[in-house]
Image (cartoon, coloured by chain):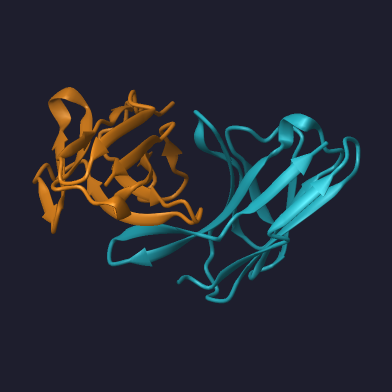
Chain colours: A orange, B cyan
Amino acid sequence: AQKVTQAQTEISVVEKEDVTLDCVYETRDTTYYLFWYKQPPSGELVFLIRRNSFDEQNEISGRYSWNFQKSTSSFNFTITASQVVDSAVYFCALSINAGNMLTFGGGTRLMVKP
Amino acid sequence: DAGITQSPRHKVTETGTPVTLRCHQTENHRYMYWYRQDPGHGLRLIHYSYGVKDTDKGEVSDGYSVSRSKTEDFLLTLESATSSQTSVYFCAITRAISSYNEQFFGPGTRLTVL
C-alpha cells in the first residue's frame, strides 16, 4: 500500500519569506508518480506539478521549485519570496498507475501574512 | 477547465436519508473518481470507474455505492447517510497527456449530515 506523509499541518510565514513544504512517501513500486496540488480558500484543487520516479531532476517554475530525492523518499516544495496569494492548503500525492488513483497526504495549510 | 460539474454543490440532510451526488463530464474521459476530503486526511478515494458499468472500490468505500450508466455521468450514493459522512466530496477525471495521466477535479460538493 502507498502512503504519503505531510508532517507540517500548518505553516505561517511573513510575505517575502521562503518556505518549504515537506512530503515523504512510501511505496514498494519502482515506477510511480508524485504530484503537488494547491487548494486556495475558494476550495478548488489546482494541479501544480507531476514527477516520475525515474526522473530525479529538480524543477523550477517561477517562484516554485521542487526537490525530488529518491534516497530519502521525499518530494519537497519550496516557494521563494512568498506572497499572500500563496496562502492555501497544499497536497502532495502519489500514484502507481501513471496518474490514476491518487494517494494524498494530509495537506499543509500555508498562511502568508502581509 | 476539464469540463467537470458536480451537483448539488451544497447539501444538508438528516441521518438515515439516502443521498445521491452527481458528477458530469463533457470530454468523454474513461476514468472517473470520487474522493472525500476531511481535515488531516487529505483526499481519500471512495470509488472509481474505468468505463460504463465498470467500477471498483477505493480506500474508504464502506457506506457508499456508485453507478455509471453513461460515460459522462458518475453517481455516488449514500444509501443511509450518517454523520461520519459529513465531508466535501470531489469528483475527478483522468486526462491523458502525452505518456502520463493527470487528474482534474470538479468543484466539490459540501455535504452535511445532521
- List the single residue furthest toward the left: A57
Does B55 sit left or right of B21 as displayed? left
Q: Quadrant of residue A3?
A: top left
Q: Residue at x 29, y 43 (%)?
A: A112
Q: Residue A19: x percent and y percent?
A: 19, 37
Does B81 sit left or right of A32 as displayed? right
Q: Quadrant of residue B112?
A: top right
Does B32 sit left or right of A59 as displayed? right
Residue B108 vertical placement versus B18 (above, below): below
Q: Residue B103: x percent and y percent?
A: 43, 56
Residue B25 vertical placement versus A26 (above, below): below
Q: Tell me the quadrant of the picture where the N terminus of chain B can be found.
A: bottom left
Q: Residue B62: x percent and y percent?
A: 72, 32
Q: Residue at x 10, y 45 (%)?
A: A58
Does B49 sit left or right of A39 as displayed? right
Q: Residue B11: x percent and y percent?
A: 77, 52
Q: Tell me the quadrant of the picture where the C terminus of chain B can be found.
A: top right
Judging depth in this view, the residue of A4 and B40 nearest the camera is B40
Judging depth in this view, the residue of B80 and A88 nearest the camera is A88
Residue A80 vertical placement versus B98 (above, below): above
Q: Residue at x 14, y 40 (%)?
A: A18
Query: What count of labels does the image hold?
Result: 0
Q: Residue at x 16, y 38 (%)?
A: A68
- List the single residue furthest toward the right: B16
- List the single residue furthest toward the bottom: B26
